[in-house]
């Protein structure tokens, strides 16, 4: 398979390998639980691209059925094209994926690398199972 997607970290390599069926999904999930991800933050709360306050608003989108979905990327470079359609979300935070599960809760879905060849979507119930994996 020819691709323009060049993995820039272990999570990117694992994501690509899982989607090409070279590793089992469980391996990707274990990597995800131990990885950092990039979360775009509304820039009203940013100073120089970094969140300056605890009231940061992460980029969330709505599905056709109205469900909220948190937008994450395997690294900041992956976000650049996507956030152009969302004014105010030019910067963000690199955080542990487990931090997102702990601090933001699991009552919503997550999309990882939306619009890119290698990405994943998780529904809220998927995140509950992933969070349980991280606690075991």
Image: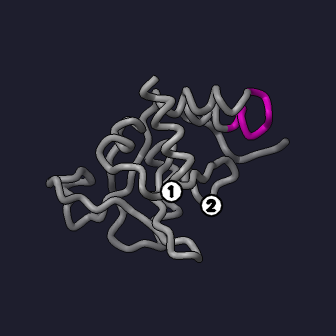
Q: Which residue is mark 1?
A: 109
Q: Are marks 2 and 1 in contact (CB under 8 Å)?
A: no
Q: Residue furthest left?
A: 53
Does residue 115 appear to the left or right of 20 in the view shown?
left
The secondary structure type at the circle numbered 2 is loop
Does residue 57 appear to the left or right of 65 in the view shown?
left
Residue 103 x/y as whole percent: 29, 45
Out of 12 and 111, give the one closest to the viewer: 111
Residue 4 x/y as whole percent: 71, 47
Q: Quadrant of residue 94?
A: top left
Q: Look at the image and say whether residue 77 sits in the magenta stretch.
A: no
The secondary structure type at the circle numbered 1 is strand
Q: Which residue is mark 2?
A: 115
Q: Is residue 132 above or below residue 92?
A: above
Kindly identify the residue that appears in the image at 19 percent across and 61 percent down: 45
In the picture, which quadrant includes the N terminus? top right
Residue 69 x/y as whole percent: 48, 62
**Image: magenta residue range:** 16-23
Residue 14 x/y as whole percent: 64, 31
């Amino acid at each position: 398979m020819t691709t323009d997607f060049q993995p820039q970290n272990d999570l990117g390599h694992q994501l690509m390998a899982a989607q090409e069926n070279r590793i089992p999904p469980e391996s990707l999930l274990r990597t995800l639980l131990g990885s950092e991800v990039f979360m775009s933050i509304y820039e009203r709360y940013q100073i120089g691209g970094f969140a300056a306050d605890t009231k940061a608003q992460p980029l969330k989108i709505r599905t056709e059925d109205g469900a909220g979905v948190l937008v994450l990327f395997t690294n900041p470079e992956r976000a650049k094209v996507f956030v152009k359609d969302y004014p105010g979300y030019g910067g963000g935070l690199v955080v542990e994926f487990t931090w997102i599960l702990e601090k933001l809760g699991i009552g919503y879905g997550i999309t990882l690398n939306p619009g890119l060849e290698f990405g994943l979507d998780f529904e809220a119930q998927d995140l509950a199972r992933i969070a349980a994996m991280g606690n075991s």
